Amino acid sequence: MSYKIYLYDTDQDCIGTGSLSSSYVQWQLEAAAGQDVEVHISSAGGSAFDAIAIYDLLKKYPGSVTTYIDALAASAASIVAMGGKTIVMSKYALLMIHKPMVDTGGNSDELLKDVQMLNVVQSRLAQIYMDKTGLDIANINTLINAVTWLTADQALDLGFIDQVEDYAANITNKTLIRGYQSKYILFINLTCYFKLKWIYFNNIIITNFYRICVLTTLKTVFPPKYKIRTLRELQTKPQIKAKIMNFD
């Protein structure tokens, strides 16, 4: 059984404080003592630096780590989610990424230093997203700058997560491919089936039409007083058979 850690926001705590701080996660991982760990996340974010520390702790943990986005992994919490070896997201949950922010004040020189610091922090956050998704820096920065909200399906398509949890079956990239393949094979089989049925049906129609045409022609050529006989029937009559034999 996996050891479970819950990083759920409270009225007082968010990523970086209380039961969502890096020190708390470190204590929980020590208690897990190498067991497989499930980290369940429902957080609007918090400290980017604490999020990076938690990410680092999860990546270095000797056991297997699976992170679950149960409702929301926004801002710093999205960085924590990236720490799992496997990332599972509820189909009802949301993932949000945006530019780092800071509450600051001071003169112009101090504000410029904050801008430089925020740009450096964004580059580190972007690197974490790049390592997970395989997207390039331009695409990641576009998503960050736009303040991007992702559904589970969108996050799966972009590579931010590995599975969508829908409480019936886990939807993975491989499962989607197999699903499309099975639907394509079914389409081909149905197409072949109906095509064969159509050919068979056409043959019946053509054959019956031919028979109707022949019989109609014979009835038109030979009045009702004449009886239409086969060659075998005619050959049984001596006088007719003699005429047939002398026909050559």
Image (tube, rainbow, N blue to C red):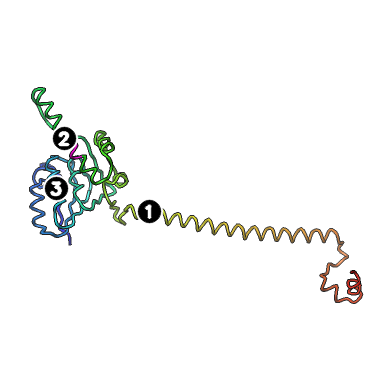
Residue 117 location, x and y as percent?
13, 32
Q: CA distance from mark 3 to mark 1?
A: 33 Å
Mark 3 vs mark 1: which is more N-terminal? 3
Mark 3 vs mark 2: which is more N-terminal? 3
Residues packed near mark 2 inside 10 Å, few (<14), some (14 to 19) or many (20 plus): few
Residue 136 location, x and y as percent?
27, 40
Kindly identify which numbered label has been placed on residue 177: 1
Q: Name which quarter of the figure residue 76 lies in.
A: top left
* Residue displayed at 29% across by 49% down: 91
Q: At label 3, which amino acid type do we have?
A: Asp
Kindly identify which numbered label has been placed on residue 37: none
* Quarter of the rendering occupied by the C terminus: bottom right
Q: At label 2, which amino acid type do we have?
A: Val
Q: Is label 1 or label 2 in front?
A: 2
- Seen in the picture, residue 140 relative to 92 is either above or below; the reply is above
* Residue displayed at 44% across by 55% down: 183
Q: CA distance from mark 1 to mark 2?
A: 39 Å
Instruction: Please say whether residue 122 is one of the residues in the magenta stretch.
Output: yes
Q: Helix or strand or loop: what does disc 3 sit on?
A: helix
Residue 242 relative to residue 168: left or right: right
Magenta-highlighted residues: 119-125
Q: Which residue is mark 3?
A: 56
Instruction: Please say whether residue 124 is one of the residues in the magenta stretch.
Output: yes
In terms of secondary structure, what is the magenta stretch mainly?
helix
- Seen in the picture, residue 16 relative to 187 is either above or below; the reply is above
Q: Helix or strand or loop: what does disc 1 sit on?
A: helix
Residue 153 location, x and y as percent?
32, 46
Q: CA distance from mark 3 to mark 2?
A: 18 Å
Residues packed near mark 1 inside 10 Å, few (<14), some (14 to 19) or many (20 plus): few
Q: Which residue is mark 2?
A: 120
